[in-house]
Amino acid sequence: ARRIITIDGPAGAGKTSVSRRAAGALGLPYLDTGAMFRALALRLGPGGHELPESAIESALGAMAFDLAGRGTDTRLLIDGAPLPEAARTEAVGAMASKLAALPVVRAGLRAVQQALGRRADLLAEGRDMGTAVFPEAACKIFLDAAAEVRAARRVRQLEALGAPADYDEILAAIEARDHQDRTRAESPLAAADDAVVIDTSGLTEDEVLAAVTAAARA
Ligand code: C5P
């Protein structure tokens, strides 16, 4: 069986940068599943979640996902190209979250994610990697942090991307997205029963990385 490590948690818990670095430390390909939901959101545009199910299904079916390389150099290719940085905004995250509540979207992307996991060992990051997509994973990690801490980090991240944002707006958007992700009927955001839960609120990124790699090597 493949070696799968899962990292789940809410928006802004620091999953993406820690996951990429942990994949580097562990020598595993890194699968950013949020990027898949964001790519679909970009493809369908605002209001995409209100399109007929058949239109969403065929848009998803027409997208090709491929994983190249490993560690910090892993590239997720969507129709041959990486997710554009412009898709990292909170607006696209909110669209992705609405799409992510639809069973047709979850089933379609779960199948793609599981196919990638059959092809190679993975460090898979998202919301439901340990609970729904890879319940048999060797090691499951859940990164959490207070909403205020996550909002402050997100503001700094968006500033670094050249998209300055207002703290109060980001906090409200993060709380709305979390609520949507935690309360959806199918595969809601939650820690798996056998996950190692790490609260990153008072930790630096290096400290989180150390805790994640220690759990993965245990
Ligand atoms: O992690 P990221 O912020 O890029 O994810 C965007 C959105 O995609 C999340 O808010 C969530 O609704 C959805 N998602 C999901 N399941 C995953 C990964 C992301 O539902 N495994």
Image (tube, helix red, strand yellow):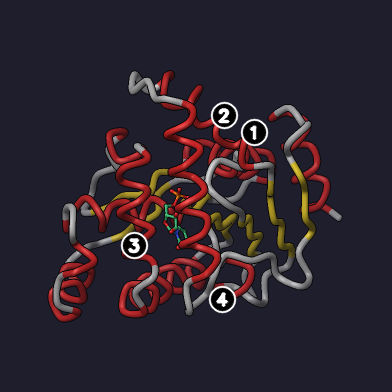
> Residue tagged by mark 1?
149
Q: Position of residue 14 (x, y in %)?
A: 60, 39
> Residue tagged by mark 2?
153
Separation of marks 1 and 2 at Cα, in angstroms: 6 Å
**Which quarter of the frame holds ligand 1?**
bottom left
Please say if 199 is above or below 150: below
In this rendering, the label closer to the viewer, 2 or 4:
2
Please name the amino acid that badge 3 sits on: Lys
Determine contact: label 2, label 4, CB under 8 Å.
no
Please name the amino acid that badge 1 sits on: Val
Indicate the quadrant containing the C terminus: top left, top right, bottom left or bottom right: bottom right
Please name the amino acid that badge 2 sits on: Arg
Separation of marks 4 and 3 at Cα, in angstroms: 18 Å
Mark 3 CB within 8 Å of ligand 1: yes
Determine contact: label 1, label 2, CB under 8 Å.
yes
> Residue tagged by mark 3?
98
Asked which quadrant contains residue 199, the reply is top right
Disc 4 secondary structure class = helix
Question: Badge 1 local density, few (<14 within 10 Å), some, or many (20+)?
Answer: some
Mark 2 or mark 4: whose residue is earlier in sequence: 4
Q: Nearer the viewer, residue 207 or 9?
A: 9
Please say if 36 is above or below 148: below
> Residue tagged by mark 4?
132
Separation of marks 4 and 1 at Cα, in angstroms: 27 Å
Question: Badge 3 local density, few (<14 within 10 Å), some, or many (20+)?
Answer: many
Please say if 196 is above or below 161: below
